[in-house]
Image: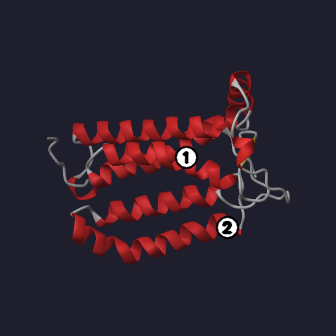
Amino acid sequence: MLVFGAVVPVSAWTIAVPAVGALVGLSAARRLAKRTGWPARGILVAVVLLSSVLALTLPPGSERHTNGLHACLPEDFPDLVRTVLNSGGGVAGNVLNLLLFLPLTASAVLTIGRTAPAVVLALALPPAIELAQSQIPGRWCSLADVLANVAGALAGALLGSVLLRRGTVRRETAGPRTRRR
């Protein structure tokens, strides 16, 4: 499916995985909420958003190749610059990649009540997804995607932090605020 000129993989996988995420979230949210003090609704939203990110980034492509980990690593500095500037689906693809992680990390901050775990998620999940894509037939890893995903995830963590600090989020949807030591 084309969205603003960028290819977005939509298949049965992109519907089934968020549905399974919702079922897992529903079954685990109350237990996790009791254990952590986080709001069950926020846990459910975060699980559905995470499963949606995985559904959009990890389905196999239509081509039957696996390009391997070597395709993710630039050979030298000019190759790094060329890879970052010329991969990732162009401007539309980069914007969509930026927007993909923003709601996930914003909801994580609002659910947990802290920014640091969302920042760790923002820095760890996009590279892990791109490495996984290097092993999935028909998928390509891209440094431009990693950078756009990390930027969007960090923006989401910042947005969640601002909303939490301003008190614009209702108490039953925000997690407990913890003091820093």
Closer to the camera in the image, 131 or 180: 131
Residue contact at pointers 2 and 1, CB within 8 angstroms: no
Classify 125 as above or below 16. above
Indicate which disc, 2 or 1, sits on the residue closer to the N terminus: 2
Classify 44 as above or below 90. below
Viewer can see residue 129:
yes
Closer to the camera in the image, 68 or 43: 68
Give the residue type at disc 1. Pro
Name the element at disc 1: helix
Task: Write the residue at 55% across / 66% down.
Answer: 18
Give the residue type at disc 2. Trp
Q: How is the image coloured?
A: secondary structure
Q: Name the residue that disc number 2 marks.
A: 13
Callout 2 crowding tier (Cα within 10 Å): few <14, some 14–19, many ≥20: some
Q: Position of residue 109 (x, y in %)?
A: 33, 48
In three-dimensional space, the C-alpha distance between marks 2 and 1, rounded to whole angstroms, equals 19 Å
Q: Name the residue that disc number 1 marks.
A: 126
Q: Going by the image, does 137 lie left or right of 126?
A: right
Q: Position of residue 115 (x, y in %)?
A: 31, 43
